[in-house]
C-alpha cells in the first residue's frame, strides 16, 4: 500500500518571521557626519567648528521626527550622537568666540592707551 503523499509534511518554522525594521530618520546620518566634521575638524582647522550648531539642529529634528512618528521611524542612535557632538562643538565655538571678543577688546584698549612715556 502506498501513502497518498510520497514526502513527509513540511515542518513548521520554529519562530514567527520578524517584521522588517523601521528606517532611521533621514537627517540622523547628516547630524552624525556634521557633528564629527565639526568637532574633529576643530583640531585641524578652526572653520569646521561652525558646522556644530547645524549638527545639533539636525540631530534634534531627526530625534523629534522619530518620537512623533514611532510607526514610521525608529529612534536612531546616530541622531543622538550627532546632537551630542553638535552640543559639544557649539560649546567650543562659544568659548572660541568669547576669547576672540576678549582679545579684540584688549587689542583696542592697548592701541588707544597712552603709557605716558611720550611714545
Image (cartoon, grey):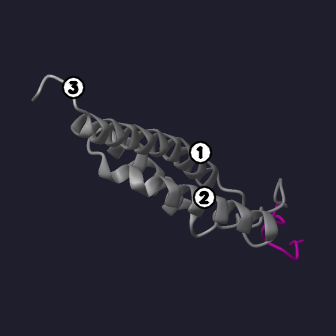
Of helix, strand and loop, which one carries label 2?
A: helix
Q: Provide residue 69's location: percent of width, then percent of height.
A: 79, 71
- The location of residue 71, given as percent across then percent down, is 81, 71
The residue that mark 2 highlights is: 59
Q: CA distance from mark 1 to mark 2?
A: 8 Å
Relative to 6, 116 lies left or right = left
Q: How far apart are labels 2 and 3 at the CA level?
A: 52 Å
Magenta residues, as a range? 1-11
Residue 70 in view here: no
Disc 1 designates what residue?
84
What residue is shown at x 41% (from left), y 49% (from top)?
38
Residue 19 falls in image quadrant = bottom right
Q: Which residue is mark 3?
A: 115
Please tell me which residue is depicted at 82% across the width and 64% down the height of the picture: 8
Q: Is residue 96 above or below residue 13?
A: above
What is the x, y in percent for residue 93? 45, 45
Labels 1 & 2 near each other (Cβ < 8 A): yes
| Quarter the N terminus occupies | bottom right
Amino acid at each position: 500500500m502506498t501513502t497518498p503523499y510520497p514526502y513527509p509534511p513540511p515542518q513548521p518554522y520554529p519562530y514567527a518571521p520578524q517584521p522588517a525594521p523601521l528606517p532611521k530618520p533621514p537627517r540622523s546620518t547628516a547630524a552624525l557626519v556634521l557633528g564629527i566634521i565639526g568637532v574633529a575638524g576643530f583640531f585641524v582647522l578652526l572653520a569646521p567648528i561652525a558646522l556644530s550648531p547645524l549638527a545639533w539642529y539636525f540631530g534634534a529634528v531627526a530625534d523629534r521626527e522619530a518620537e512623533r512618528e514611532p510607526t514610521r521611524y525608529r529612534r536612531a542612535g546616530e541622531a543622538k550622537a550627532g546632537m551630542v557632538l553638535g552640543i559639544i562643538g557649539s560649546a567650543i565655538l562659544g568659548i572660541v568666540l568669547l576669547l576672540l571678543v576678549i582679545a579684540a577688546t584688549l587689542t583696542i584698549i592697548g592701541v588707544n592707551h597712552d603709557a605716558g612715556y611720550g611714545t
